[in-house]
Amino acid sequence: MDADRLKNIPVFSDLDPSAMSIIATFASEVSVPEGKELVREGDYSYELLAIEEGTAEVTRAGGKIADLGAGDVVGEIGVVERGTRNATVTATSAMLLVTLDRWDVKRLAKQSPEVMAHLKELIEKRKAEL
């Protein structure tokens, strides 16, 4: 994956170029169709998903709680803290996602501690919003 594409995703955008380059070596790109369930509430979290293109809806206990779009990140809490998904996310359009699985995140933590610190900061903000 091209590290320059990560600049459009806020969670990565303020990282230095070497950190983005490390992330790019681990990241994968996935296209999903409209209607695809990206994550399901209660399931174990195995990957972090960053939306590069497209939109999604977030629901909890069957009720809509948010809309997501380009630049938003899903799954960071479960991947970093090894927990279950706290909501269901469904694509409301075709989407292009940047993904990092749990093993990628572990390797990232070893190679780039500042990236992990950044992700943990995002997690704390998200928890405060829940």
Image: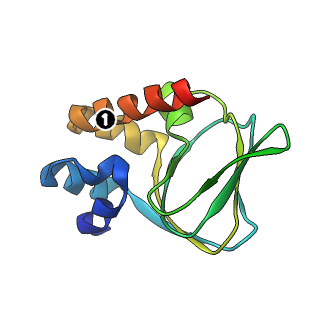
- According to the picture, the residue beneath numbered tag 1 turns out to be 118
Instruction: Say which quarter of the image contains residue 92.
Output: bottom right
Position of residue 67 relative to residue 123, above or below, is below
**Helix, strand, or loop for circle 1?**
helix
Position of residue 32 relative to residue 115, above or below, is below
Q: Position of residue 38 (x, y in %)?
A: 67, 55
Q: Is residue 64 left or right of residue 62?
A: left
Instruction: Say which quarter of the image contains residue 98.
Output: bottom left
Instruction: Say which quarter of the image contains residue 125.
Output: top left
How many marks on residues? 1
Q: Is residue 47 left or right of residue 17?
A: right
Q: Position of residue 61 (x, y in %)?
A: 83, 37
**Point 14% across, 55% down: residue:** 17
Q: Position of residue 67 (x, y in %)?
A: 64, 55
**Residue furthest to the right:** 62
Q: Quadrant of the N terminus?
A: bottom left
Colour scheme of the rendered structure: rainbow
**Point 65% across, 60% down: residue:** 56
**Point 75% across, 34% down: residue:** 42
Q: Quadrant of the C terminus?
A: top right
Q: Amino acid at mark 1?
A: His
**Point 29% across, 30% down: residue:** 117
* Crowding at mark 1 (Cα within 10 Å: few <14, some 14-19, many 20+): some
Q: Is residue 23 left or right of residue 105?
A: left
Position of residue 70 relative to residue 86, above or below, is below
Q: Is residue 58 left or right of residue 54?
A: right
